[in-house]
Amino acid sequence: MFQETVTLTNRTSKTLSAMFDGQRFRFPPGPTPGVPVVVAQFAKAQNPVMGTQDRYEVESGECLMGVEAWGDPISPIEQSSAIERLDRSTIEDEGKNAVPGPKVRVRASEAIHRLKQDGGEAARQ
């Protein structure tokens, strides 16, 4: 069975990867011809430019990869310093100024122990 293929362009200066059907695909900078359409779709979805997605428009964000035949931009771009997909400037309420909390690492066994101690009360708050 033959699959339709496209040329997928990695717009960054770093190798990007995508997972499809249990396989990891790696894409070096620049165009990669012969990529199955479904793999290209997954690769684009898994490699967003962070901080560019509108909260109401799921497909509004930019991608680090593009398919020129689909009308995608393929000009060079690098990943932003944003830590999430959402563009916080599109949020109007108090969520606009949300900041990440402190990074605290907790082992799973410790979290389970804490849940057992307080009966799961902390998880409900």
Image (cartoon, rainbow, N blue to C red):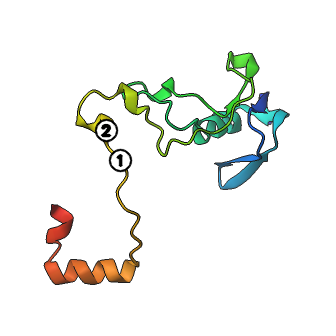
Give residue 74's quadrant in the image.
top right
Q: In 3D space, how far apart are the residues under numbered discs 2 and 1 (Cα atoms)? A: 6 Å
Q: Position of residue 52 (x, y in %)?
A: 50, 30
Q: Is residue 107 left or right of residue 31?
A: left
Q: Position of residue 7 (x, y in %)?
A: 81, 28
Q: Quadrant for the C terminus, please.
A: bottom left
Q: In terms of depth relative to the viewer, which is nearer, 37 or 73?
A: 73
Q: Is residue 54 left or right of residue 78?
A: left
Residue at the (31%, 34%) spot, across then down: 96
Q: Position of residue 14 (x, y in %)?
A: 76, 45
C-beta proximity under 8 Å, tags 2 and 1: yes
Residue at the (39%, 69%) spot, across then down: 104
Q: Secondary structure at mark 1?
A: loop
Give residue 76's quadrant in the image.
top right
Residue at the (77%, 48%) spot, across then down: 26
Q: Is residue 98 left or right of residue 71?
A: left
Local packing at callout 1 (Cα closer than 10 Å; few below 14, some 14-19, many 20+) is few
Q: Is residue 88 left or right of residue 59?
A: left
Q: Amino acid at mark 2?
A: Asn
| Residue 3 visible in the shown view | no
Residue to which mark 2 is pinned = 97
Residue at the (71%, 31%) spot, across then down: 37
| Residue 48 visible in the shown view | yes
Q: Position of residue 38 (x, y in %)?
A: 67, 35
Labelled disc at residue 99: 1
